[in-house]
Image (spheres, helix red, strand yellow):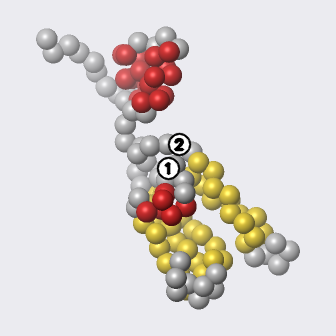
Amino acid sequence: MRGIGSIKDLKVSNRGSSRRVTDLEIIGTEGTAHIRGGRIRSALGLKDQLFVVDREFDMDGKVKSFTFTGRGFGHGVGMCQVGAFGLAQAGYTYQQILRAYYTGIELSSLY
């Protein structure tokens, strides 16, 4: 990023209700900046904003590298189509699949 110098550290400043990162602070040698919302994923080249950041340090205690470990894919607000398809192939009924993604629901016929 321009204006902050070399990156010294990254900190997750905020996570949304789905635990996805909504605010990433970039700490540089000359200042700090924030990346927010959907820009985080594209800026880091990740498939989703549900991740943790691990650091590797050098002998002086400075961050040498970052490792991003993903914890999921998608938007985090509903049913994963790929996961639902996998459950269907494993023999789950549509009722079982719906209950796996949406807890505390009641299924009923409207016709």
The residue at 73%/72% (across/down) is 63
Question: Viewed as shown, does residue 81 lie left or right of 110?
Answer: right
User: Percent position (x, y) of residue 30?
Assistant: 59, 88
For disc 2, the marked residue is 72
Question: Callout 1: few (<14), some (14-19), or many (20+) C-alpha neighbours within 10 Å?
Answer: many
- Disc marking residue 94: none
For disc 1, the marked residue is 48
User: Percent position (x, y) of residue 101?
Assistant: 41, 29
User: Percent position (x, y) of residue 88?
Assistant: 46, 16
The answer to whether residue 54 shows anywhere in this view is yes
Q: Are marks 2 and 1 in contact (CB under 8 Å)?
A: yes
User: Percent position (x, y) of residue 104?
Assistant: 35, 27
The residue at 36%/16% (across/down) is 95
Give amino acid for label 1.
Asp
Q: Quadrant of the C terminus?
A: top left
Q: Secondary structure at mark 2?
A: loop
The residue at 43%/33% (across/down) is 80
